[in-house]
Image (tube, rainbow, N blue to C red):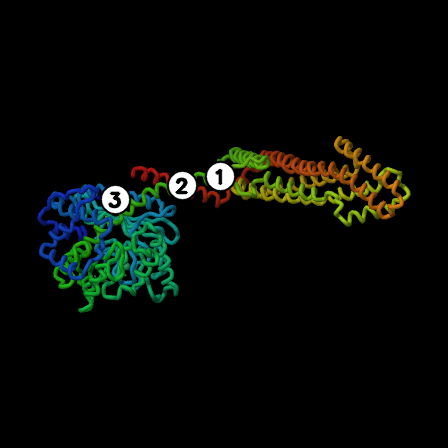
Amino acid sequence: MMGRSKQSKGDDKAKKVSSSPWAQLKEEQKQPKLAKPVQNPQGTFETARGASALQNNDQSEEVYDVHDNEGPVVHGAASETQSELDKLSRESIDSTDQHEQGISPSLTKEFDAQVRPYIDLIDNLRAYGLDRDVGLPAVAVIGDQSSGKSSTLEAICGIQLPRGSGIVTRCPLELRMKCQREKYLNWGGKISYKDKHGNKQSKDIDTSESVEEAVKEAQDAMTEGEVGISEELITLEVTSPNVPDLTLIDLPGIARVAVEGQPADIGRQIKKLIKHYIQKQETIILVVIPSNVDIATTEALQLSQEFDPDGKRSLGVLTKPDLIDKGAEAQVLKAVNNQVIPLRKGYTMVKCRGQAAVDEKQTLKEAIQDEKDFFENHDKFRVLPQDQRGIPSLAKRLTVELVEQIKNVVPDLKTDVRKKLEDTREELRNLGDGLPLTEEGRQGVLLDIVSRFKDELKGLAKGEYTTNLGQELRLLTEVRRRFDTFGTAVEGMAPSEDDRYLMIDIKKQVANHRGRELPNFIMYPVFEALVRKVIRNMKDPGELCLKDVDRSIDIVLDKLCNKWFSRFPQIMGDVKTIVSALRVAAKATCETKLDEQFDMEDLIYTQDKTYLREIDILKEKHKKDEKKRSYMSQEYGKEDKEQQEAEHILDALNCYFTVCYRRVIDMVPMIIRHQMLGVLVNRIGIELTKFAANLANANHVVEDLGVMQKRAELRDRKNRLLRAETDLSRF
Ligand code: GDP
Ligand code: MG
């Protein structure tokens, strides 16, 4: 990619090739070549402890001495990745002759073939912006201010990064390193970021020396003033024969106090930013800790423990071993050996350039040699095994860890991406396509939307629901529920002997009509008055039922209007007005029809055969009662007579109630359903179609800006998810 374009300039670049750990490795690798490692039945390779020992030559004895003297050592790399690491170390040694032929010094072709695709996969996914949708594996570098983060990073990548006191790293810096295999293609760099106005910027960088300036420039363009920080990522891609295949994110240091010009809560802001990266389970946390402080007190380690309590994603780096006070080495050795604050991935010790070395213009290449000499000659630290010391080991270690992490998350990523893609497609479908440019075209879109609105409304009114529809939108179900409530209320109005007030009322009326009665006949006017009273009572629940149904419809209409018309803010208002006017009118019609129904009930009429039969039976019973009463007239007092009369009237009332209650509990819901779910729904469809067809000026069919943006965002997301899906399908 970047490298290829530089092909022609390759030669003079070669002179500027940065120093790096790999150059150092070149020397190291001029070691006796080992026999090819034997793969064991588990598919892993035999431990390379022997290889390290061989590399260490005379130091190998001492490595084991330390372990013997200090008991079992929880080894940093005693994890699943150990075998990978071992394999890598061994292959590095094996690759010596390949290197002589011009292949990258650090890693073999085979290893490259294993590692690069995974790193590329994640780099690509991140480049598509997929990290906005799903968590992507990364190595995030955290540490207190001036703990040596940038120094460690620059040693790994061989590029001078901005340094100084105070917060120098003000934006997260994603450093993508690609080892360039073809020797003639040399150093290539590119920086990209979004400035504070949201514009994307990117710039090719020709020499590693210009990186520092470019990063500073980017930070200035992204943040306010000279000390502000930003959450946006600066991406720095580097292709070189001298870098590992690795992507790291450098984060601003944890600041304790604000310096002049910084907001007082700068510490909180930085912590928030760091948390944003390290809280993701996919992130490997590289915790940089100076060896010359008490590691337990470092904020970085506390933060990593907070977000990775088991320490399974954290890897410790102890810097500045040259600044340790005499006598404090034993304690630091314990820390490196994972005995102070244990992390599953353990610790590595590195030594970078101190300020004096920088001032003396020590190159990074020299610094790596310096580090090597330092460890080899240090009377306390030379016992450290190779994989726990030095920038080159750390770099290899990180590559292996990162690839391991990527392999772990690929299956989940696939599932995540598929699910997100489905959701995005669904959202896009609901939003509809963008608008055509011609007036007719736009009117067509509007008519189409009206028709979809209409269909959905009709479906809801008929009880045809799609799955996962909210309760409120299940219109017919809601309405039926209200009808049930109405039915129960009316049923509960059945006249009963137990109703003391009713009996008193009946008796009172019987007394009032005394003298007008015929023998053996119930007092009709009394009966009629009582029936009307019962019917009048039924009106209230009827009206309440209509009111409730109207409210349900109102909610549904509002939701549907928002769903279908919010794209067109200029039109939605009109649509809502039309729809609500129709609804109000329908409700008024419905009220009239209900009144009519209750007026009709006042006629007190039925040809219901069951009723007539029952009434005959009642008459017979009443006659018998009458006869009984005349035989035993002495025993019957006035009160008994009234009671009996009242009971007879109540019998008749009950008989008629059964008829009219059956009529009412059916008719009222039928009228409401017919008017509100039938007539109204049809009218809405017709009127909205008319409205859309007659729209004088289709220019009103203008989409809301927010909707257009939303659609554009969704399309972007869909595209990046599709690309990710394709990329992931290869794994
Ligand atoms: P950051 O704020 O964590 O990025 O820290 P820097 O990388 O900017 O380092 C802070 C200071 O510590 C610089 O002056 C470095 O030169 C110095 N430094 C970093 N690592 C070492 C080291 O291993 N030994 C010595 N002596 N100084 C170091
Ligand atoms: Mg820094």
Residue 597's spot in the image, x, y percent?
74, 37
**Mark 3 surroundings: few (<14), some (14-19) or many (≥20) residues within 10 A:** some
Q: Is mark 1 within 8 Å of ligand 2?
A: no
> Is residue 393 at least partly visible in the picture?
yes
Residue, disc 2? 419
- Location of residue 310 (image quadrant): bottom left
Numbered disc in front, either 3 or 1: 1
Q: Which element is circle 1 on? A: helix
Q: Position of residue 154 (x, y in %)?
A: 23, 55
Q: Amino acid at mark 2?
A: Lys
- Please say if 434 is above or below 134: above
Outermost residue on the bottom side: it is: 326
Could you tell me residue 130's position as x and y percent?
36, 45
Name the spot of residue 115 as percent of width and height, x first.
24, 44
Q: CA distance from mark 2 to mark 1?
A: 17 Å
Among numbered discs 3 and 1, the one appearing first in the sequence: 3
Q: For the residue carrying disc 2, how many other residues have a C-alpha within 10 Å: few (<14), some (14-19), or many (20+)?
A: few
User: Which mark lies nearer to you, 2 or 1?
Assistant: 2
> How far is the residue under mark 2 from the one under mark 3?
33 Å
Q: Earlier in the sequence, mark 2 or mark 3?
A: 3
Q: Quadrant of the C terminus?
A: top left
Q: Secondary structure at mark 3?
A: helix
The residue depicted at 86 percent of the width and 45 percent of the height is 636
Q: Nearer the viewer, residue 187 or 458?
A: 458
Q: Earlier in the sequence, mark 2 or mark 1?
A: 2
State the separation of the CA atoms marked 3 and 1.
40 Å
The amino acid pointed to by label 1 is Asn
Q: Which residue is mark 3?
A: 2
The disc placed on residue 430 is 1
Q: Amino acid at mark 3?
A: Met
